[in-house]
Image (tube, rainbow, N blue to C red):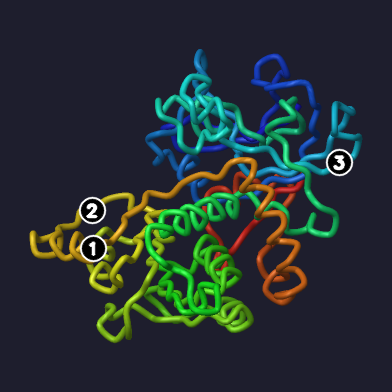
Amino acid sequence: MKAIVVKPSSKGVEVRDVNEKEVQNFGRVKVRIIENGICGTDREIVQGKMTSARAPQGRDWLVLGHEALGVVEEPFGEFKVNDVVMPVNRRGCGKCNNCLMGRADHCETGEFVEAGISDMDGFMREYYYDDPKYLVKVPKGIEDIAILAQPLSDLEKSVNEIIKVQERVYWTCNDGTFSCRRALVIGSGPIGILVSMLLRSHSFQVIVANRREPTEIEDQIFQEIGAEYFNSAKGYTELKGRFDVIFNASTAPPTVIEDIIPFLNYNGVLGLFGFPPSGEMKLSFQEIQRLSLKGVAILGLANGQKPHFEEAMRHLSQWKITWPKTTNKLITRTVHVDEAPKVLSFKEENEIKVKIRW
């Protein structure tokens, strides 16, 4: 069968034939892949820049891909032929309590594996076999945008975690929602857009910041969902007010974190989802004191599991009705698998999500 293959730590990617016995499978449900999504992680691996990328033990190559939609080919349990499914991409270590309870996002050993990233073949191939507990059914009517459920699942988990942590204080407003809470999202790329949509769904006031003017598509999206945009090219000095949540969805230099920390409100949350590839930041003892005295929480955020994939599917279904113009813009274009090496090598201008079709 055909597969998209990389050699971690080496630059390059190819579409080539692989023997089914050479690649990993994970269960008894046969899934024929119909499409894959491309994200920054895939491109980092292709460029040889992701140091944590690893091939399965015993070989030097890896099947790429952690975003996928597939069709069930053979019935098994609750899954019927032609059910459209999405696989969960992180799998647990099988040792710690969290992984044994289905929460590999909080693995305590660090020995989890991630499809198409570390120690586990990914989903950029014609078909594979999986365990039903790692498959999520795709609701009818959202197949065109369902590939977004994978990155959105990470954000569902992130926002849920922020809200859970904030149970330490009375955080809802006098109408019982989060409508009086302000959120600053750093970065207006695919993650920045999706988390802004999610925060707006939770009634937060949202400002999205990037170091440039918004593109025409971004402007249209933020207008429809009711978010504001701030050009931070000259810094944040003109940004008004304080924020209850600051969510870093960018790969901006660490100095950006230095710049935005003073804008955190009392009992605020700094969510670190995106991270810089290099650089450093400094905090003075006065700034550390202020963070402590203001009761600020700093959270590292990553990876959603099956419940978060299901939440993501529900939100995508909702958004197709409430924000139809936006959901129509989220998929930039779809390419055939033969074009995969080209689109995996660089990000296109104004790209949100590119899909590879098998």
- What residue does disc 3 label? 83
Residue at 56%, 29% (x, y): give it: 101
Residue at 47%, 40% (x, y): give it: 45
Residue at 41%, 63% (x, y): give it: 247
Residue 255 badge: 1
The quadrant holding residue 352 is bottom right
Mark 3–mark 1 Cα distance, whole angstroms, equals 47 Å
Mark 1–mark 2 Cα distance, whole angstroms, equals 8 Å
Between 107 and 277, the one nearer to me in the picture? 107
Residue 118 located left or right of residue 356: left
Residue type highlighted by circle 3: Asp
Residue type highlighted by circle 2: Gly
**Neighbour tally class for label 1: few under 14, some 14-19, many 20 plus, Cα within 10 Å:** few
Mark 1 and mark 2 residues within 8 Å of each other at the beta carbon: yes
Residue type highlighted by circle 1: Thr
Residue 79 at what x, y percent from top left?
85, 34
Residue 292 at what x, y percent from top left?
19, 59
Residue 342 at what x, y percent from top left?
60, 49
Q: Is residue 15 above or below residue 290?
A: above
Q: Is residue 40 above or below residue 12?
A: below
- Secondary structure beneath dot 3 equals loop
Residue 33 located left or right of residue 340: right
- Secondary structure beneath dot 2 equals loop
The quadrant holding residue 274 is bottom left
Mark 3 and mark 1 residues within 8 Å of each other at the beta carbon: no
Residue 279 badge: 2
Residue at 80%, 34% (x, y): give it: 32
**Neighbour tally class for label 3: few under 14, some 14-19, many 20 plus, Cα within 10 Å:** some
